[in-house]
Image (cartoon, coloured by chain):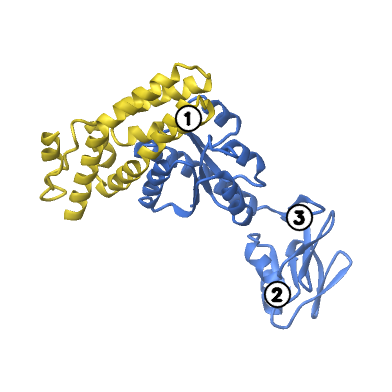
Chain colours: A blue, B yellow
Amino acid sequence: MKTILVDDNLMEIEALKSYCQSSSDIELAGVFQNAQQAMSFLNKEEVDLMFLDVEMPEMTGLELIDNLSYLPQIVLTSSNREYAYEALEYEVTDFIKKPILLKRFQKAMEKVEERHRRINEVALSSAATELYVRSDGKLVRLPYDEILYFENVGDYIKVISERGMHIIYGALKTLADKLSYPRFLKVHRSYIVNLDKIVDIEDNSLVIGKKVIPISRAHKPLVISSINLI
Amino acid sequence: MDKILEVSTQAPESNNQVPFEFSKDLDAAFLSATYGSNLAFGVKMFGIFVNSIQQDLDILESSATNNDYSTMRAIAHKIKNNFTWVGLSELSKLTGQIETLASEENSSVVSVVKDLGDKCSARLPFVEAQYRSLEAATTAC
């Protein structure tokens, strides 16, 4: 779990570093003594977990959370118990009152791992039925069974679904690795099709809707073996 | 003091057989629970404390002299848990009082700052002795 520590107190940082280094689940990606440095780092790199002090000069931990474009799991730390309420409001994974002792750190890590496991389960369950594409500043959900085919066009991929077309940046090979739907099949270097949407197949092409899609010689045996040919 | 040095500088024959004995003049139970299985961690924590506390106390005292409540509050907040890490939790409580009084701009904070300075000066030799004994034990390992 890629983790950063943000605290202006050297002793608290040292304690957390020591605990993190003894945990095989944690990859310590950065240690920051102020929130601005942490924000610069987080704008460039995504992390899974952040131990974040609330009270720091210049920018507080809560202000850092407010300014982030994405939220990793957060364990808020403070020597003042009154911030436990804010921790609830911000829906962080845990709140630890300082000084942070090993047992309390381990308890927090149990909560972090439980939430990490639940997030992964939800993501896996989503990946089995749908994908999301960025379109006009939004993330658009496309259920697999509504997708007709993917077409590679230069550095982009056209995603053709029953509800319209979306264009995403990327390579067809990379996309193919991310699709976990067994009814998608690559039929040509530029096309991945939804087998359930094929209208007919003729020699070296197939039809989906009104689109005629070529089938390459190399991919044809796989296409034939994937359909229920009587 | 001599007795403490004698007890706490004893290097263990083996980590598994003879547990390191923490100074009874500090919170030995806390220190043992926190650093007993990882003395190198203790060396780092005591090192940070010993090398920084005097400077922080100097700033605290000069800000008290100047009635600079904001600096007093910030320094008290910064150092209050540091005392706990070296087995001086009663000084953490005193520093917590300074933080509260300074945030209320209560002039009685000045005498509490002086009290903290005096108590810290009295206890610092024990902390330094513990630091040396931890260093000696980890070097022996």
Spatial CA span between label 1 and label 2: 83 Å
Which one is closest to the eye, mark 3 or mark 2? 3
Residue type at mark 1 is: Ser
Quarter containing the C terminus of chain B: bottom left
Query: Callout 2, which amino acid?
Result: Ile
* Viewer can see residue B97: yes
Determine crowd level at label 2: few under 14, some 14-19, many 20+ residues with C-alpha closer than 10 A.
few
Residue lying at 40% horizontally and 36% vertically, measured from the top left? A100
Which chain does tag 1 point to? B
Quadrant location, the N terminus of chain B: top left
**Inter-mark Cα distance, 3 to 1:** 54 Å
- Judging depth in this view, the residue of A88 and A210 nearest the camera is A88
- Residue at position x 12%, y 44% from top? B10
Q: Which residue is mark 1?
A: B63
In this view, the mark in front (3 or 1): 1
Outermost front residue: B66
Q: Earlier in the sequence, mark 3 or mark 2?
A: 3
* Residue designated by label 2: A224
Classify A101 as above or below A25.
Answer: above
Question: Which residue is disc 3 drawn over?
Answer: A134
- In space, the residues marked 3 and 2 are separated at their CA atoms by 33 Å
A193 vs A109: above or below = below
> In the image, are marks 3 and 2 on the same chain?
yes
Say which chain tag 3 marks: A
Say which amino acid is labelled 3. Answer: Arg
**Residue at the location (42% across, 24% down)?**
B96
Horizontal and vertical percent position of residue A14? 39, 46
Q: Is residue A228 visible?
A: no
Res B8 → quadrant = top left
Q: Is residue B76 left or right of residue B103?
A: left
> 10 Å neighbourhood of mark 3: few (<14), some, or many (≥20)?
few
Q: Position of residue B92 (x, y in %)?
A: 36, 28
